[in-house]
Amino acid sequence: MDNTVRTRFAPSPTGFMHIGNLRTGLYAYLFARHNGGKFILRIEDTDRERMVEGAEEMVYRTLAAAGMDHDEGPDKGGAYGPYVQSERAGIYREYAEKLVELGGAYYCFCSKERLEGLHGENGTHTYDRHCRDLSREEVQARLAAGEPYVIRQKVPDGVVSSYTDMVFGEISVSSEDIEDGILLKSDGMPTYNFANVVDDHLMGITHVIRGTEYLSSTPKYNLIYDAFGWERPHYMHLPPIMKDATRKLSKRYGDANFEDFVAKGYLPQAVVNYVALLGWCPKNNLEKMSMAEMTEYFDVDGISVSSSIFDEAKMRWLNGEYLKEMSAEDFFRVSAPWIAKADPEGKFDAKEIASLMQTRVDVLGEIPEKIAFLNGFGEYDLGMYEHKKMKVDVDVAKRAVKVSISALEPLAEWDEESIKAAIVKAAEEEGMKSGQVMFAMRVALTGQPSTPGGAIEMAVVLGKEESLRRLRFSEALLNA
Ligand code: GLU
């Protein structure tokens, strides 16, 4: 017998990849890879109203960016296709009819009006099994007459349906608490309740990994497996990701979507790494892990039954760790588009700026603001030059800026070493502390009291010509 583990990721193409969905897909991916198995992508698009144009492409883009490569799927093909539910309508109908034959389902001709009349105490209604025992002849006659119908699950009486979830343990539901729910709708499309069973079975899924919202419906799905005489898969349900103690993370509460985070300057691998930690902790307690490491360490025992809270500050920190550990070249590659936002014409040396930024940002999106000084001075207030501890005031600043101009003008080499040597020497000759000169020089170069680097680094980034132009401009303002 083939024991290959097969897991699937079954997103609905709603236009964005919510962090919770991404985590579900990631765990399915890690579980499959950890066990040398296959990871399958299935698009669940039977709810046509929720569909969004281009959403399927977003799923492919996200999986590719996240490094979760699937073995089978709509775009890759495979032996168990089609992998898009809307292309499987014929399959669901065939199996729904088969289930009727097997005694696990029945035709229901109840009108909408009749169903609406079945109000329970709290406004909800449970189907009263009105059509459950229609005779075969009556059903045939009504079908032949073209009456609209649905196919409902025939939940057996007096059973308790139980299974052992890999995360939550034993889950049992009594058949009294299970409605004869719709499997095939009047438009011929399946409900999720039916499609998930048929697809997971036909696609040979061994381990169903999904959110806890399906934990207590699974006994109902298992009754369908049983009625078909199919082997049930194993189940792993995952607790929700919360925004805080009471609210689930959802798009209602802001940008909890993969591509939004990437657009804000997070690295896909950092987001994926952080998402992995939302509800799972490896035995060795590692936090920063590559996909290969996560695959190696992934184990069900480390999955928590309690919900986890999405903490963007922690994800920022982790992202910063990824940025710091990149090679200068890689960092330059990922930061270049962000540097270009502040310097669209490429007037400054982007490599210098990148090396200045690498240890100073946690998220790439911070870069444009940090280097806004490149575009000239903002509000210019001489108070910026006051620094009590360093004993700098406007008068000291005037002298400092003057000596830095004369020290820098003759320089042939414009690099950190040469600039520093020149400033230190000039400060000494002037009887000033080099810290005082550099503080005033930094303000004079940027027009800002706090800058993403010291005076020397600012000067290197700005280049000689621009640095001198700014120093002279500031000198004039100081003396005005
Ligand atoms: N399409 C379902 C969802 O997005 C998937 C549920 C499942 O994995 O079975 O919630």
Image (cartoon, grey):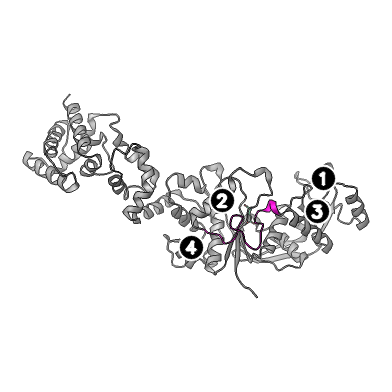
Do tag 2 and tag 4 residues touch (Cβ < 8 Å)? no
Residue sitting at x 41%, y 60%: 288
User: Is label 3 within 8 A of ligand 1 (CB to nearest ligand atom)?
Assistant: no
| Quarter of the figure with residue 324 | bottom left
Q: Which residues are magenta?
A: 68-87
Residue beneath disc 3: 151
Alpha carbon distance from label 1 to label 2: 37 Å
Amino acid type, residue under disc 1 in the picture: Leu
- State the quadrant of the C terminus: top left
Q: Nearer the viewer, mark 2 or mark 4?
A: 2
Circle nearer the N terminus (3, 2): 2
In the rendered image, is residue 132 in sight? yes
Label 3: element kind:
strand
| Quarter of the figure with residue 40 | bottom right
Q: Nearer the viewer, mark 3 or mark 4?
A: 3
418 up-or-down from 102: above or below:
above
Amino acid type, residue under disc 2 in the picture: Val
Q: Residues within 10 Å of mark 1 (few under 14, many from 20)?
A: some
Residue beneath disc 4: 281
Front one among 430 and 205? 205
Label 2: element kind:
helix
Extreme residue toward the bottom, this view: 1
Front one among 135 and 422? 422
Residue sitting at x 89%, y 54%: 139
Label 4: element kind:
loop
